[in-house]
Amino acid sequence: MCGITGIFDLRGQRELDRGTLARMNESQHHRGPDEGGTHLEPGLGLGHRRLSIIDLSTGQQPLYNEDKSVCVVFNGEIYNYQELIPELLSLGHVFHTRSDTEVIVHAWESWGEACVQRFRGMFAFALWDRNRQTLFLARDRLAVKPLFYAHLADGLFLFGSELKSLLAHGGLPREIDPLAVEEYFALGYVAEPRTIFCQARKLPPGHTLTLRRGQPPAEPKAYWDLRFSLHQPLALEEACDELNKRLRESVRLRMISEVPLGAFLSGGVDSSAVVALMAGLSPAPVNTCSIAFDDPAFDEAKFARIVADRYQTNHHCEMVASDDFDLVDTLARLYDEPYADSSAIPTYRVCQLARQHVTVALSGDGGDETFGGYRRYRLHMMEERMRSALPLALRRPLFGLLGRVYPKADWAPRVFRAKTTFEGMARTAVEAYFHSVSILRAPMRRQLFTDRFRRQIGGYSAEEVFRSHAQRAATDDPLALIQYLDLKTYLVGDINTKVDRASMAHSLEVREPLMDHELVEWMATLPSALKLRSQEGKFLLKKAMEPSLPYDVLYRPKMGFAVPLARWFRGPLKERIRQAVLGPRLAETGWFDQAYLRQVVDAHQSGTADHSAPLWTVLMFDAFLRNVLDSTTDPAETRANANAVV
């Protein structure tokens, strides 16, 4: 795993400053502490930080073709590179390394922009072709690896694995995008392709960007999308056999490494399945790592131990205190933009533990989206059956009124919250799903933001992110639709972002076999009844793994990787949350209604409501302002940029 960065002069061949390129590259040192390299020529600079995984002796980057007219910097892994090498050799290419990086160079020479169609892996890369005066950027299909970019007013184009490398250039304005703030407070992250800054963007998943010197900036171009055809009605036994075969192949490809390798083991279905498959493929015991919590309500360690004992793994478990909340500022600096998934704390800790024993770890991420495992899927499908019984023209006024007048019951399980059900019934399927996953729902965001800030947003709602994806989903199956939405939003913006930054903070490479695009494509051909059946999520995966995993691991209630926010904000973080939420920094932006913020804090700390998730979201926004904006600009510029939004 690595970090890449660069500068490209779209207008000409200006001399670029070597020190600026070095500063951008060094800002991502944590992503690749083993080696660093740069390439500089008139009008172009490429930088690379390397974490050595494959071809340790000759895989340095930037890497070139035979005459050095093509150069690449690459972050990720091409898992099928060994299959592509013979084909490229037969086309006359000469290899000087044993690395997957060199495959990218020669694949570009042979297949041009279509080369990405041949790659099976997680990747973000930038390739310079001097003869064509072309810079080509690509990001993998499910956006496991990040790639940020910005077009500056002076004609320079910047890119990097993290926003901090663009900020290190010094030319990127720190003006905050008000629409990104709306998305953040709805979703807990800024959705692709937007970033928190007006002029910076994320390259969307499954997209490329081709820039040619002397031509206007191009727009990203999609090379892949997922289609839920659901056309393959296999018998259960046949589907289980095929799934096991595909899972083994995906795990096998991700076990190729020249450095110590292991796996995360939470005790949940997904990570346990990955470990079971690894054990069947490895002649030596698998290295496994898990986190235990001192609060039994959040601890899954005993289930991880059951799997570890069954497969005789080299298991490493570390106790984390339930009051492990000292990472707030560290997380803000890692993510570079507001990010509000509190499970980033235990994820950071398990990556920290894993790096003490391995350099590469396999995870179970992507299993819920691929196999239909989220509890919210079951609830959405229950609501969808009720919605289908009445037309929207009747539902919207009737249940809209009931949703407005019925009292909230945040303390109750969602299935018993009539207000939530009424609100969902008054909406379309897409509106209802967005409403259900929002951290601060629309009424709360309306009260949170000041009138001036709402005018700046101009009527925009983060719901538009879901609507735009839904238009491309090409399915009317209710489960497939929300799986597609999660694959485009939550998986990319939340899960993959969390794991990438937490792992790279410790120079750890994480590989996700359940996000193999060929596996995901095959699952999208299967009927939804094989994913969610009789309120049992991940039905097919669990049936396929029954011979390999204990019943209590497969069929116990899902816990998630959570932290006790509600208790923190009424106990050890009581004063800290009040100081942050009601402090001068948020007030000076002019974006937030201070009276409403006080009302939210008071209601939570009095125990009359659980506002822990919204309060964490506000806390992490404050941490972003302090640790990213304030650390990269002088206070006067920070305030000016904040005021420019309102």
Image: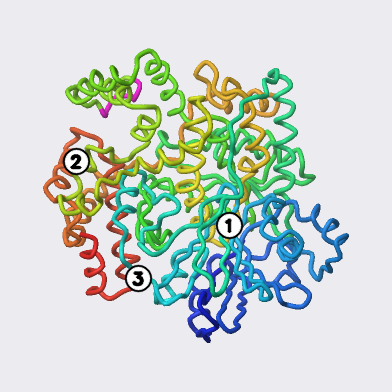
Name the residue tied to disc 3: 173
Q: Amino acid at mark 1?
A: Thr
Q: Amino acid at mark 3?
A: Pro
What percent of the width, then of the height, locates residue 17? 50, 85
Circle 3: element type = loop
Name the residue tied to disc 1: 208
In the picture, measured across the screen, residue 298 lies left or right of residue 638, that is right
Residue 197 image-quadrant placement: bottom left
Q: Amino acid at mark 2?
A: Gln
Query: Dot 3, crowdedness within 10 Å: few (<14), some or many (≥20)?
Result: some
Q: Is residue 426 above or below residue 132?
A: above
Which residue, as the protein is rendered here, is positioned at the far top?
389
Circle 1: element type = strand
Q: Residue at x 56, y 40 (%)?
A: 366
CB under 8 Å between discs 2 and 3? no
Mark 2 / mark 3, whichever is N-terminal: 3
Q: Please tell me which residue lies in front, 230 or 548.
A: 230
Q: Residue at x 47, y 75 (%)?
A: 156
In the picture, measured across the screen, residue 182 lies left or right of residue 221, that is left
CB under 8 Å between discs 1 and 3? no
- CA–CA distance in space, label 2 to label 3: 38 Å
